[in-house]
Image (cartoon, helix red, strand yellow):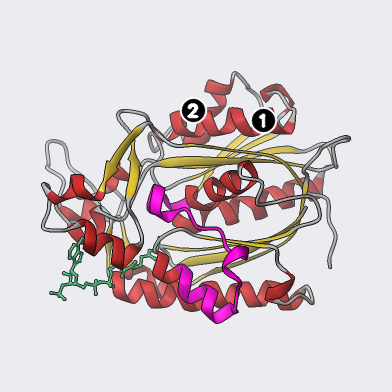
């Protein structure tokens, strides 16, 4: 396996306190707990009550820094992966930087929808390859409820808010109990399929004028059935590609952490890869689809639950709007 110098030293995650169950939706749109459960596996999701992207991200970041044994002052870069930033300018990474009490380092946002964290990992890996002194904070935070049309039952029941974070360092810190080496990342995109999953309103191609009311295109719009098929196929292909180029097979992986969008997508991926259910991490039932935050929330939770131990090989894989998709391998 290829070796490099990007060590995952700390993870954290945060969900806003308020929980919305499937039953809570029954009074808002024509849906049922039974439909949502059988079609998606989701039972509940956490909902922001006024917290912005950087607020959720801050909580996850503080945990990740604590785990890494670093202070914000030791960071060299802050990357925020999100499509629901607090504001367009300043970017969410700068807002987070200020909340962390750090200044004069690089801070940027990355938007690749649900694949955001995997893209963030690759950028962090590059920065760590440039300097062994790099300490890169990758935060994936989404307040999806700010871009969900509650009246659209085909999307509103799917999404939740939350944040996950990871610290990657250019050199292995001494005495770390659980330190992962990010050995490879595989990224893909295909703009020809972008229309299947969009958030358009307010963008420069769909500007909002002063006093104008927002329309449906301000919110997430998705051709669910089509996206489903692409998600399964793409996550399978990019998982196999990263494994094959590292001379690995699915059975060599101790834990697969897929994007948590729909239990049927996860099950289909697991079936195609012939994965043992014990080697698959699933928490979609508790949080719904938290977009970019879903993989790092799952990673943080898997570590908390001791589903990952020293010596384990972890495969993360995600798919999202754009389309974008990608996979990452971490050797603990
Ligand atoms: O994170 C980025 C990637 N996103 C995804 O991966 C999401 C991918 N897509 C999916 O997860 C699924 O396609 C959905 C969960 C969005 C939809 O499930 P589906 O099994 O593909 O359902 P469908 O869209 O084919 O709709 C089946 C029926 C339709 O009614 P008719 O036309 O058969 O009468 C929908 O109108 O279910 C209806 N429906 C609902 N019924 C009750 C759609 N949403 C709901 C709802 N409650 N919330």
Q: Are marks 1 and 2 in contact (CB under 8 Å)?
A: no
* Residue 100 placement (x, y as % from top left): 58, 22
The residue carrying mark 2 is 95
Q: Residue at x 37, y 31 (%)?
A: 17
Q: Quadrant of ligand 1?
A: bottom left
| Residue 290 is covered by the magenta coloring | yes
Which residue appears farthest toward the top when viewing the image? Answer: 101
Residue 65 is labelled as: 1
**SS for dot 1:** helix
| Looking at the image, residue 148 lies above or below residue 15 | below
* Residue 236 placement (x, y as % from top left): 55, 76
Quarter of the image for residue 176 reads: top right
Which residue appears farthest toward the right when viewing the image? Answer: 174
> Horizontally, is 325 left or right of 254 in the view?
left
Q: Which residues are magenta?
A: 266-292
* Residue 263 placement (x, y as % from top left): 41, 65
**SS for dot 2:** helix
Label the magenta part by its dominant secondary structure: helix
Q: 266 or 52, which lies in front?
A: 266
- Alpha carbons under labels 1 and 2: distance apart: 17 Å
> Horizontally, is 230 left or right of 63 in the view?
left
Is label 2 within 8 A of ligand 1 (CB to nearest ligand atom)? no
């Amino acid at each position: 396996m290829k070796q490099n110098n990007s060590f995952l030293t700390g993870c954290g995650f945060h969900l806003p306190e308020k929980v919305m169950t499937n039953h809570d939706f029954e009074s808002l749109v024509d849906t049922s707990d039974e439909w949502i459960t059988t079609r998606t596996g989701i039972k509940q999701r956490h909902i922001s009550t006024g917290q912005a992207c950087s607020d959720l991200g801050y909580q996850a970041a503080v945990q990740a820094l604590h785990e890494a044994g670093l202070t914000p002052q030791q960071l060299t870069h802050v990357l925020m992966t999100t499509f629901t930033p607090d504001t367009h300018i300043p970017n969410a990474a700068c807002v987070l930087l200020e909340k962390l009490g750090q200044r004069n380092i690089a801070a940027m946002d990355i938007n690749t929808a649900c694949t955001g964290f995997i893209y963030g990992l690759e950028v962090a890996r590059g920065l760590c390859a440039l300097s062994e002194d790099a300490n890169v904070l990758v935060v994936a935070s989404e307040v999806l409820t700010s871009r969900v049309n509650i009246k659209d039952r085909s999307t509103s029941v799917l999404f939740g808010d939350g944040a996950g974070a990871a610290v990657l360092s250019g050199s292995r810190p001494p005495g770390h109990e659980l330190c992962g080496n990010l050995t490879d990342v595989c990224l893909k995109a295909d703009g020809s399929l972008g229309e299947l999953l969009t958030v358009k309103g307010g963008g420069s191609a769909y500007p909002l004028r002063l006093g104008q009311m927002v329309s449906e295109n301000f919110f997430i719009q998705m051709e669910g059935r089509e996206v489903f098929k692409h998600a399964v196929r793409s996550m399978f292909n990019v998982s196999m590609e990263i494994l094959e180029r590292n001379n690995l097979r699915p059975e060599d992986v101790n834990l697969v952490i897929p994007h948590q969008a729909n239990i049927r997508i996860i099950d289909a991926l697991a079936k195609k890869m012939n994965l043992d259910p014990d080697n698959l991490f699933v928490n979609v039932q508790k949080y719904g689809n938290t977009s970019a935050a879903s993989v790092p929330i799952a990673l943080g939770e898997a570590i908390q639950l001791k589903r990952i131990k020293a010596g384990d090989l972890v495969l993360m894989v995600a798919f999202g709007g754009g389309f974008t998709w990608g996979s990452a391998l971490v050797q603990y």
